[in-house]
Structures are given as structure tokens and as C-alpha cells.
Image: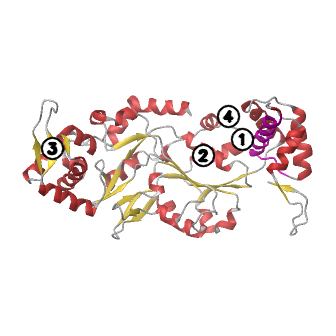
Amino acid sequence: MSDYNSVAQDTINPIGSMRFRKIAPRPKCVEDTGLSREFLAELAAKHLQAHGTLSLSALANALCLSGAIVEHVLNFMRSEARIEIRPSHADNIGLKYTLTDRGRSGALDALLRSGYVGPAPVPVKQYARVARAQTIHKQSVSRATMNGAFHDIVLDQELLDRLGASMNSGRAVFLYGSAGTGKTYVSQRLTRLFPDPVLIPYAIAVGENVIQLFDPLVHKVIDQAMTDGDYQLDRGHDPRFQVCERPAVITAGELSADMLEVMYEPSTKTYEAPLQLKANNGVFILDDLGRQRIEPSVLFNRWIVPLEEKRDYLNLKSGRHFSVPFDVVLVFSTNIHPLELADEAFLRRIGYKIKFTPLTIEEYERIWRDTCLALEVDYDPDVLKFAINELHTRSGVDLLPCHPRDLISMAVDNSLYTVNQRYVDREGLLWAWRNYFVSLEGNSRTGRHQAIG
């Protein structure tokens, strides 16, 4: 992954920084922010309420705005008798601002309406313009890119080419096949295909409502130094945006319907962006489809309009509607047949339906060799033949990418336990096999004696 991070770093300087200054220029006055002077005054008051006293530079850093804009807002607040200047001391150089009684009352009223206290948000229209300018669908994936991203994975070239072409389609992708065929692992690797950085705002504003968008669990900041202290005031682009890797949101069985809508927390009076909005300009993977807490039909109906229009329509608690770009590579991954999850009308909207199948013997051997090397055990071709001919073939168990890693690691667990050495032989592999698979022996419903994964 380090190679891809270095590409992203190179993109920032100087070409990337020039691109960012063009699509998100630094605001020079209040009007450039797209926010009202009153809105910024209330946000500054909430910061002062939280910290007591702050200098101009500290407020500028907290709001992610230039000193000239913040000074204009502070002068307005002084004219309204909301703030006052604390006298400086020998050990306290520079002007410090604090709220007056009137200012504290106004700050508390503002907090009752919105609990957001952070950088100045970006109006939703400005955000939409930036998101469209850095769309992921203008990125071109080539065979060389695919081979580079998956160079350390044993993957059939035809399957790799189908995946690569699907990334250029701008349409959703449906990965399906038996459990253990590598769908999840491969889908997560797709994020390596898009190493160029993007701008992610801390928050967006819909009218007077602020929605937290930046999520440190999703958005990986590329150049942290540029976001610390006074550095952010020197950035050529709008400092309300972070320079990040393209987002990668991966969700599985924990997904619920409310996670796809703007979330409101009554206790803090704050809004948080839904998952697909956090994933904008990146990749959104819905893994283990069909196991979520939301019915597949409900989930698919939720995506029909965004997939068609490339726009998502969201609602606030007040009932206000707004739209944002739906700019993601949407990947569905499941071990359930697609026709059992969705009707043909929805499947037509998905450009690629790519099936993952069991490995060939040659592919299985390559993975076995690589696993032995990674786990620091000697490769024994006789042990591999025993695994394929005596275990897989006799039990009718397909050759899957997960088996070498799991079986060899379990055999090593046993060898370390019994003789304190790392090795794999036939007896150890048979021991691992019996512990890895669920035996149907004695199952009254089947009467079968086959082992299954």
C-alpha cells in the first residue's frame, strides 16, 4: 500500500495543489464562504463558549478560515456587544477575545438549535461542485493498473480483466459466488485502483443546518502537517477541506436503513452524513449482501434513483429536502445468487455481474506456496498432493483461496503446541482439516458423513 500512498503524495505537490486551488479556491471574504456573517458569528460564539478565551489565530484555526475573514466577523460581534477583548499580560501576548453576558446568552441559544462546534461548513452547493470536479468516474483503470494493484494475489486474468473493465463503467458491480472464493478480499483491494487524493469537507451546510461529513474512520488524511496549527491558513485551497485518500466505505451485516439517511443525534443536536455521502468520490462496498438488518428489496429500492440519476436525495429532521452527488463505485458482494436477492429490473441497472468460482489446481498450488513462505514453513509437494487428492477430492470440498491459509496456520498451531516447531505434515494437515470443517456425521437430517466448510 505504501506505493499507492507515495503516488498520492506526489499528486498533491505541485499538480494536486494547483487542482485543489482551482476547484476549491480559498475564501477571501465572508461572501466567498457562502455563509452569512451571522452564521459565522454564532459558530465563533460557540467556540468561545467552549474555550473561554481565544486569540484571532486560534479562532481562525478552529473555523478553518483566514484571519481576515475571522477578524471581520469578530468586529461585527464587537459592534453587537457579544464579545470583548481581554487585556494582555507579559506572559499572554496578543489580543484575546471572550464572550460578554449577551454573547454567552446568544451562544447558548445557538447551541440549543445546533450542537455543531467545529470548522466552518461548506454550503451544499459548493460541496456538490467540488465533488463533481473530482468524480471517481473520470478515473481510468487499465490492465497495467489492475495487475499492479493485485500483483501479490493469485487471481485468474480473465476475472481480473472483468473487474478492471467494470471500474471504468460508472455503474454498480455485483460480485457473487460461494463463500470463501475471495470476493470480500478482492473487493477491498479495489480501493487501491484510485490513488489520487481528493478534498473532503469537515462539514456541509444545508441552510442553517450543519452535517458532519469528515469521518476519521473513513477518511485518511494524506498530509497531516497541512492540517495542523497555522499551516492550514497557508493552504492555497479552501482550508475547510481536508486532503484525503479517496474514501473506501465497507459495510456488511451491521448495515441498517437509518445508516443510509442523514442521522440526527437529539442529545447533542448534531447531524451526521450517511454512509454513501461519506463514500462520495470513492468506493462503497456492501459486503455479505442479504445478511443485513435491512431487507434486500428495501435496500435496492433505496439505490434505484441514485444509480439512475447519479444524485442522492436526503432529508433533515425538519423535513427539509436536499440533494447531493452520488459519486461512488458501488460494489455488492454476496454468496447468494443475485436472482434470489433482486428482480431483473434492478439487476439491469447493475452493469456487471461477476461470478467468483473455485480455484484450479495450479492456482491452489500457487497460493499454497505463497502461504508456506508467509508462515515460515517448508513447502512439501507431497503434503499439497495429500490435501488435494485425499482431503478435498474425497470430501467433495472445492478448492478455495481461503483454505491454504486457514489449514496451514492451524497445522502450525498444532505443531507449535505438540513439539514447539513450525512445520506441516500429513498428520498435522489431517488434524487441521478435522478441526476446520463441520462434520455432518451423525446429522439425523442428512445421514451424510461428508465434511463441509
Reading the image, the residue beneath label 2 is 188
Query: Which mark is first along the chain, 1 or 2?
Result: 1
Q: Which residues are magenta?
A: 397-418
| Residue 155, label in figure | 1
**Secondary structure category for the residue under label 1:** loop
Q: How many marks?
A: 4
On whether residue 415 falls in the magenta region, the answer is yes
Give the spatial CA distance, label 1 vs label 4. Answer: 9 Å
| Residue 152, label in figure | 4
Q: Position of residue 336 (x, y in %)?
A: 70, 61
Identify which amino acid the numbered label 3 is placed on.
Answer: Tyr
Compared with 78, 291 (above or below) is below
- The quadrant of the image that shows the N terminus is top right
Identify which amino acid the numbered label 4 is placed on.
Answer: Asp
**Secondary structure category for the residue under label 4:** loop
Q: Are marks 4 and 2 in contact (CB under 8 Å)?
A: no
